[in-house]
Image (spheres, rainbow, N blue to C red):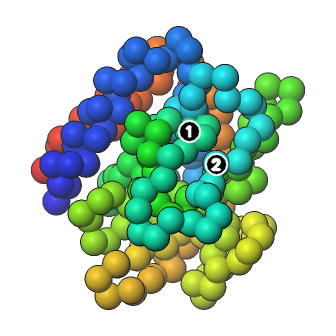
Amino acid sequence: MLHRSMRVTLLALATSSLSTIASAELFVVSGEFSNGYSITTVFETFPGTPGTFLEQPPVPPPAPGPWATTYVAEMTLTVRLGGSVVSVGSPIVAGTSFDRFLQLGVMESSGSFTVHEFDVATITPGIDTYYFASNFVDEAGQPSATALDRYNLFRFTISTGAEEFLGFATSLSMSPIPAPGATALLFLASAVARRRR
């Protein structure tokens, strides 16, 4: 069951994009994983964000509190299994991240974008189980200080500390979203959340 706070967050993200889309950039990261999983990460950067940037928590990372982001204003991650949504979360809302492990490294070259550092979760305050995709955690669940050459998908339960490896990425790509499509995609995410009540 999708909690009301998630639905409100998605709707707020969609609504906020209407007023900032002219002065900010929206992007989508899409990934296909083994075992039938896929992810879609939609994020909006602050106006003036360079094409190449690294969004990460301060050092040392805050525990457990939220932290102010530098480049990414909003972010929503959707995880699907066989085409059905299994988790949606917004780790960044209004320039505040709730994920102390978040990493998003983007490189731009000749108008093309690639992701080189990626640790993004559906973590949302008040939710016990979340999913995360990362190239900083190996299949055994062991963290790495540097980016790995593979993106992995996990499910994590906070109350028990249980972490389950779900699959590795068979593809991962990033692209900017044209303005009309961005708004439509965000409203679609909101509609999916409402249907999963």
Query: Where residue 106 sits: x, y (%)?
Result: 72, 43
Q: Which residue is mark 2?
A: 55
Drawn side of residue 17 relative to residue 44, left or right: left
Going by the numbered disc 1, the residue's amino acid type is Val
Label 2 – label 1 distance at C-alpha:
7 Å
On the image, the x and y values in percent for residue 8 come to 22, 40
Q: Contact (CB < 8 A) between labels 2 and 1?
A: yes
Residue position marked by numbered label 1 in the rendering:
72
For image coordinates 71% across by 48% down, the residue present is 54
Closest to the observer, 11 or 164: 11
Q: Quadrant of residue 46?
A: top right
- Which secondary structure lies at badge 1? strand
The residue most toward the top is 22
Callout 2 secondary element: strand
Residue 102 on image: x %, y %? 56, 59
Q: Which mark is residue 20?
A: none
The residue at 37%/67% (across/down) is: 130
Density class for disc 1 (Cα within 10 Å; few <14, some 14-19, many ≥20) is many
Between 178 and 106, the one lying in front of the other is 106
Q: Residue at the spot x=47%, y=24% of the render?
A: 182
Toward the right, the furthest residue is 110
